[in-house]
């Protein structure tokens, strides 16, 4: 049976895998860190990954729109039926720390909805992906497995950000300490993948994020049976003029596990 967006999914997976090789070529080097205008770090690994992914996808899908963290936003994407949203190295701080907790994020948006998403963790050699309506999957060691969130309602496993912690989230976890068995820190979109595969149950982000931080993992979590929303419990709209999210977001295995 043919999978929807089969050609696009294959291209995204291959682009992520090859970009991962490019990133790993410089991973163990003493890489120069540059601060962008918003004071976030960037390295030549970010730029090299970005160049490869964009070159490949633009060549294969020249009539689509493109939005990437490390490229100037061309608003012509708003006129396109399809738009690719890319973070060529999500978790640059984790890359710099060399803890392996960074990912490559690639999503395909139709209208304002993500229809295909890929997240690749190069150091861990784990590839996560989903197509709308087709479920969520993980590839590792040559094997493909369908993933699903846990069904836990008690003794929950919570995630905290390693590099973007907020007092508000720490206080929220403290107020619900009787419901939570484990709290672990993790970086990048990898957190959402861990919830999608059932290892963890809760993550809240009270800061601002960009669309490339959430687009693919939004679909992966949803297709794995999870709950991915902004903090006001509305869904995300992608490929709009606004690329920043100031509402924060939450990822849950079950909506019943939301913390108030």
Image (cartoon, grey):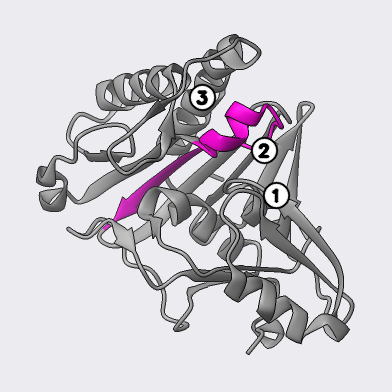
Percent position of residue 239, x then y: 25, 55
**C-alpha separation, residue under disc 1 versus residue under disc 3:** 25 Å
Camera-nearest residue between 145 and 179: 179
Residue at 41 percent across and 40 percent down: it is: 40
Q: Is residue 130 left or right of residue 114?
A: right
Contact check, label 2 and label 3, Cβ < 8 Å: no
Q: Secondary structure at mark 1?
A: strand
Residue at 20 percent across and 29 percent down: it is: 62
- The earlier-in-sequence mark between 2 and 1 is 2
- The earlier-in-sequence mark between 2 and 3 is 3
* Residue 52 vertical position relative to residue 113 in the rendered view, above or below: above
Q: Secondary structure at mark 2?
A: loop
* Residue 160 vertical position relative to residue 86 in the rendered view, above or below: below
Percent position of residue 186, x then y: 70, 49
- The earlier-in-sequence mark between 1 and 3 is 3
Camera-nearest residue between 38 and 63: 38
Where the C terminus falls, by quadrant? bottom right
Callout 1 crowding tier (Cα within 10 Å): few <14, some 14–19, many ≥20: many
**In the rendered structure, does residue 103 fall within the stretch colored magenta?**
yes
Percent position of residue 254, x then y: 69, 78
Contact check, label 1 and label 3, Cβ < 8 Å: no
Mark 1 vs mark 3: give the one in front: 1
Instruction: Give the residue number, with chain letter if any, for mark 2.
Output: 101
Q: Which residues are magenta?
A: 90-110
Q: Is residue 37 left or right of residue 217?
A: left
Instruction: Give the residue number, with chain letter if any, for mark 3.
Output: 14
**C-alpha separation, residue under disc 2 versus residue under disc 1:** 7 Å
Contact check, label 2 and label 1, Cβ < 8 Å: yes
* Residue 197 vertical position relative to residue 140 in the rendered view, above or below: below
Q: Secondary structure at mark 3?
A: helix
Instruction: Give the residue number, with chain letter if any, for mark 1.
Output: 186
């Amino acid at each position: 049976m043919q999978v929807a967006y089969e050609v696009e999914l294959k291209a995204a997976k291959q682009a992520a895998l090859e970009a991962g090789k490019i990133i790993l070529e410089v991973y163990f080097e003493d890489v120069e860190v540059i601060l962008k205008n918003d004071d976030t770090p960037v390295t030549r690994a970010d730029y090299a990954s970005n160049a490869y992914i964009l070159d490949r996808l633009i060549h294969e899908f020249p009539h689509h729109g493109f939005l990437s963290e490390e490229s100037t936003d061309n608003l012509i994407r708003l006129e396109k039926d399809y738009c690719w949203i890319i973070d060529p190295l999500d978790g640059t701080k984790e890359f710099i720390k060399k803890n392996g907790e960074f990912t490559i994020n690639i999503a395909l948006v139709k209208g304002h909805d993500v229809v295909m998403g890929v997240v690749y963790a190069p150091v861990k050699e784990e590839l996560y992906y989903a197509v709308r309506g087709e479920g969520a999957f993980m590839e590792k060691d040559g094997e493909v497995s369908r993933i699903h969130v846990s069904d836990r309602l008690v003794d929950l496993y919570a995630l905290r950000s390693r590099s973007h912690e907020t007092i508000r989230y720490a206080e929220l976890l403290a107020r619900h300490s009787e419901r939570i068995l484990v709290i672990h820190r993790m970086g990048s979109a990898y957190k959402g993948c861990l919830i999608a595969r059932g290892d963890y149950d809760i993550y809240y982000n009270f800061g601002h994020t960009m669309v490339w931080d959430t687009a693919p993992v939004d679909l992966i979590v949803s297709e794995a049976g999870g709950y991915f929303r902004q903090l006001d419990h509305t869904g995300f709209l992608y490929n709009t003029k606004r690329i920043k999210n100031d509402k924060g977001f939450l990822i849950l295995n079950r909506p019943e596990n939301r913390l108030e």
